[in-house]
Amino acid sequence: MIASLTRRALYALATSSEVESVVRAIPPARDLAYSAARRYVAGVTLDDAIETVRRLTGAGLGVSLDLFGEGAADEEAVTRTVRGYRAAAAALADVDGDVNLEIVPSHLGLDLGLDVCRRHVEQLVEFLPAGSRLEISAEESRRTPQIMDLTVALAEAGAPVMATVQANLRRSPGDVERLLAAGVPVRLVKGAYLESADVAHAWGEPATVAFVRLAHQVHAGGSAPVLATHDPVLREALLATVPGAGVELLLGVREDDAHALVARGVPVRIYAPYGDSWFRYWMRRVAESRGA
């Protein structure tokens, strides 16, 4: 109970623009917070991020590069975001390695309408390096229906996309069936958002069981899931029973595990976010560490 309350309190801080504003307004507090967050962040600038990407690919790791942000409220904000993602895609073209671009749909105008978001995402597809995928992030359950519609529509139009499915959501088995029918690769996560009991399985054992079932569902559907989890017991159990599965880890979390898996021949990808909006992401990582 205490751990759950702590996680909820930290999550509230992670989504508070007021708290972020206070921290950023006090240089010593901002610098201290970024010092703690730095292990999870590829950099504030794109140049810093690309240096991090090259370090990771040089170690035999795949990378998914993402530009921090979500919930764009107007077209001007979305246009700025598109420019940022386009610059990131162009920079990845000069990196020798397995690199993908990850996007957050609400960062690209999902809340302004599905058609608005799709129009902007289609621009980014044109800038993807050869052989790269556009990985589509998961968000709160209220956005999930539109994200699934967006992902399937892009795939049917020939875009090289990868979906993210949150195991804790009760709707996810149906989403997996739809994605498999559309030929969309699936990355499984446990789910980082706080959701009501009617929408999601509880954090902990129920979400873990759902994760296992979904991994086997993806495999039974003829696809190899990407297991985005830092739980070594869960990961090893599934690697032993789901042939071809890959692993995704967050930058700065269990890096030794990543290198050990690569040495065993397991494909490993690192999620590497960058940009100035790092505060809320860092607080979410702290919140998750209290609820794991």
Image (tube, rainbow, N blue to C red):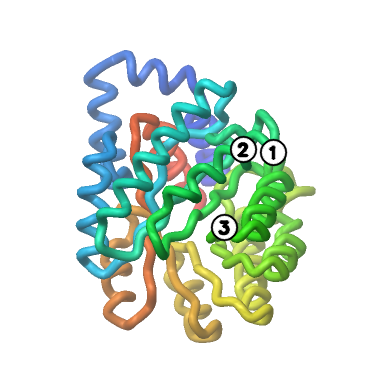
Residue pointed to by mark 3: 159
Q: Is residue 168 visible?
A: no
**Vertical relation: 210 (above or below) 140:** below
- Which residue does the image show at 72% across and 60% down from the upper left? 175
Q: Is residue 239 visible?
A: yes
Within 10 Å of disc 2 (Cα), the crowding (few <14, some 14-19, many 20+) is: many
- Which residue does the image show at 52% across and 42% down from the upper left? 123
Q: Is residue 108 left or right of residue 43?
A: right
**Vertical relation: 249 (above or below) 232:** above
In the rendered structure, which disc, 3 or 1, sits on the residue that comes first in sequence? 1
The CA span between labels 2 and 3 is 15 Å
- Which residue does the image show at 51% across and 39% down from the upper left? 6
Residue pointed to by mark 1: 114
Residues at badges 2 and 1 in contact (C-beta under 8 Å)? yes
- Residue 104 lies, in percent from the top left, at 53, 42
Tag 1's secondary structure?
A: helix
The CA span between labels 3 and 1 is 16 Å
Q: Is residue 219 left or right of residue 97?
A: right
- Image quadrant of residue 159? bottom right
Residue 117's disc number? 2
- Residue 269 lies, in percent from the top left, at 38, 64
Amino acid of disc 2: Cys
**Vertical relation: 206 (above or below) 215:** above
Q: Is residue 92 left or right of residue 75?
A: left
Amino acid of disc 1: Leu
